[in-house]
């Protein structure tokens, strides 16, 4: 029997794929250059990519940091700044990896709640400030938008929070930011004002380049120790960097994709909320969280699988009857919505 090809809408990958210019880089690799280190360090910068990112964000290159994905930078900042017994504040519903890296260094995890509204989750900044004051964490993670809830923190609320975090390193994970927020200007203002702030971004999500493993961060002036910790003197991955630069050179491609994805997020939000017993939560990322009637969890999963569709069935405290759907191509999204409707109507 022929094996059915599965469509993975459970991984928050971007099925639109990278811009055509990225493929051009791969079709014309300069193999001689692959034999040598880039050694951009000798020019006083980390790499061509960090230089370009500095221009994009109108920021000094020394404030840009590169890593092998946001994952790598998150791990590095925890290993650099957090030691056994230090406290770290983590959103209660969030990417499991945050807790995993805190455990690697035997940090003490303090969870702060995310509030569930009717159609959106939100950060309770008053409670976060209270916890900073009482727990005195060495580090705080904020994800904006947060995975899996899809909500972001308002800029004014983030600033109010940062004002209270003078003694903590604050890491704002913006892996999913660009889908709903293309503004870059606030980044410079924030890292200019808050010296313990690290804002992490990635080429994996919006740019559909998860496989090249490039993430970057913009940091406040007090994080010089982290900058040294993460420096790679011989250079980064030449090929990945060229692909990332080609992606930055393709704004029209990504803007067209972005608008289609936003339309499909709206489609999922509206269609799921029409179904009895389902609640879709507003999302500012490339995925959407939907609460489903708990009794249909297993049969719905099986029904979707029979159609070759995989979504993430959550299995965490207070998120037991929820699915997280990564936005696929318009065709995949339609297939999924129709499969759910077919299941509900039977
Ligand atoms: C919230 C969040 N941050 C960061 C990442 C890391 O992405 P990458 O390491 O590919 O940059 C992910 C990946 O799923 C994520 O969900």
Image (cartoon, rainbow, N blue to C red):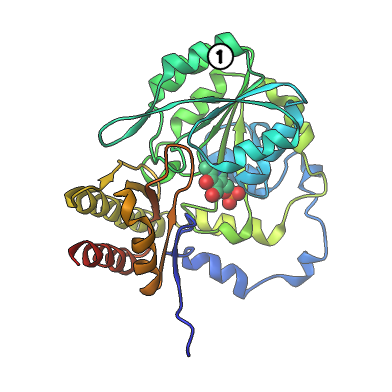
Q: Percent x, y for residue 111?
A: 54, 26
- Residue at 71 percent across and 27 percent down: it is 107
Residue 94 relative to residue 84: left or right: left
Residue 254 to residue 216: above or below: below
Q: Quadrant of the C terminus?
A: bottom left
Residue 223 relative to residue 179: left or right: right
Residue at the spot of label 1: 132
Q: Mark 1 Cα within 10 Å, few/some/many (few <14, many 20+)? A: many
Kindly give the residue lying farthest to the bottom in the view shown. 1
Is 231 in front, or is 114?
Answer: 114
Residue 27 to residue 231: above or below: below
Is 302 in front, or is 101?
Answer: 302
Kindly give the residue lying farthest to the front in the view shown. 295
Q: Percent x, y for residue 208?
A: 49, 58
Residue 168 relative to residue 127: left or right: right
The quarter holding residue 32 reads bottom right
Q: Percent x, y for residue 188?
A: 52, 28
Is 131 in front, or is 165?
Answer: 131
Disc 1 residue lies near ligand 1 with CB under 8 A: no
The quarter holding residue 27 reads bottom right
- Residue at 67 percent across and 71 percent down: it is 29
Residue 22 to residue 190: above or below: below
Q: Percent x, y for residue 271?
A: 20, 54
Residue 289 to residue 185: above or below: below
Is 183 in front, or is 343?
Answer: 343
Residue 206 seen in the figure: yes
Residue 163 seen in the figure: no
Q: Secondary structure at mark 1?
A: helix
Number of disc labels:
1
């Amino acid at each position: 029997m022929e094996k059915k090809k599965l469509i993975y809408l459970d991984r928050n990958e971007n099925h639109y794929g990278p811009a055509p210019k990225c493929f051009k880089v791969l079709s014309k690799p300069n193999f001689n250059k692959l034999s040598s280190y880039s050694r951009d360090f000798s020019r006083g910068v980390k790499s061509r990519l960090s230089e370009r990112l500095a221009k994009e964000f109108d920021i000094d290159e020394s404030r840009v940091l590169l890593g092998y994905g946001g994952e790598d930078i998150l791990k590095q900042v925890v290993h650099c700044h957090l030691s056994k017994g230090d406290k770290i504040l983590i959103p209660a519903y969030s990417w499991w990896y945050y807790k995993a890296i805190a455990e690697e260094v035997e940090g003490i995890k303090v969870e702060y709640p995310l509030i569930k509204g009717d159609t959106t989750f939100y950060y309770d900044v008053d409670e976060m400030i209270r916890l900073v004051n009482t727990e005195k964490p060495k580090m705080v993670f904020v994800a904006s938008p947060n995975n899996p809830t899809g909500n972001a923190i308002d800029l004014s609320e983030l600033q109010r929070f940062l004002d209270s975090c003078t003694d903590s390193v604050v890491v704002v994970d913006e892996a999913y930011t660009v889908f709903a927020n293309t503004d870059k200007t606030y980044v410079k203002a924030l890292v200019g004002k808050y010296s313990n702030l690290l804002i992490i971004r990635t080429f994996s999500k919006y740019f559909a380049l998860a496989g090249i493993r490039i993430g970057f961060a913009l940091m406040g002036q007090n994080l010089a120790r982290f900058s040294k910790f993460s420096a790679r003197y011989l250079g980064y991955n030449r090929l990945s960097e060229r692909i990332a630069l080609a992606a930055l050179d393709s704004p029209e491609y990504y803007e067209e994709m972005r608008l289609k994805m936003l339309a499909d997020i709206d489609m999922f939000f509206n269609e799921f909320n029409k179904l009895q017993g389902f609640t879709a939560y507003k999302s500012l990322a490339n995925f959407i969280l939907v609460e489903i009637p708990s009794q249909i969890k297993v049969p719905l999963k099986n029904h979707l699988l029979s159609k070759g569709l995989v979504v993430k069935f959550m299995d965490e405290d207070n998120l037991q009857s929820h699915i997280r759907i990564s936005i696929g191509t318009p065709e995949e999204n339609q297939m999924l919505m129709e499969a759910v409707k077919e299941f509900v109507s039977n």
